Image: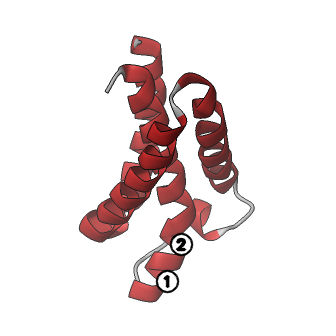
Amino acid sequence: MNSLELFFLTLFTAGVTIISYKGYALQKGWAIGQMYHSDSSILKIVGLLSIGSSFIISFFYIKWYFVLLGALIGWLISGAITAIFRVNTQWIALFLLIASFIILIIN
């Protein structure tokens, strides 16, 4: 896996984690930060944009079957992160979002 593929995977995983945390946390009774609770917060908008942009733009740089496989893997990683780190998932998702751009810059 090269750094461009890792960038798209990390960006997609961060977006899915940001978007899906609220529903999962409500089911489990976990604390939800204000940025995650509001559906119109800048964080949720960034999460949605990162999902859409990483999925669509990656088709131009990566073979289509790697993109579909990466989307599935990113979704599974997001679920694992949420299940393992629980409330701390909120911080991990932000770290993943920042880390994805650091990976792109290092490339």
Identity of the residue furthest to the right in this view? 40
Please give the label number shown on residue 22: 2
Q: Position of residue 68 (x, y in %)?
A: 50, 47
The amino acid sitting under disc 1 is: Leu
- Along the viewing direction, whichever of 28 and 77 lies nearer the viewer: 77
Q: Position of residue 54 (x, y in %)?
A: 59, 38
Q: Secondary structure at mark 2?
A: helix
Q: Quadrant of the N terminus?
A: top left
Q: Tell me the kind of residue under disc 2.
A: Lys
**Do tag 2 and tag 1 residues touch (Cβ < 8 Å)?**
yes
Residue 6 appears anywhere in the view: yes
Q: Quadrant of residue 77?
A: bottom left
* Vertical placement of residue 56 versus 47, above or below: above
The number of discs equals 2
Residue at (46, 34) in percent of width and height: 98
Q: Residue at x 51, y 30 (%)?
A: 63
Which label was assigned to residue 26?
1
- Secondary structure beneath label 1: helix
Q: How many other residues sit within 10 Å of disc 2, few (<14), some (14-19) or many (≥20)?
A: many
Residue at the spot x=46%, y=15% of the render?
105
- Labelled disc at residue 74: none
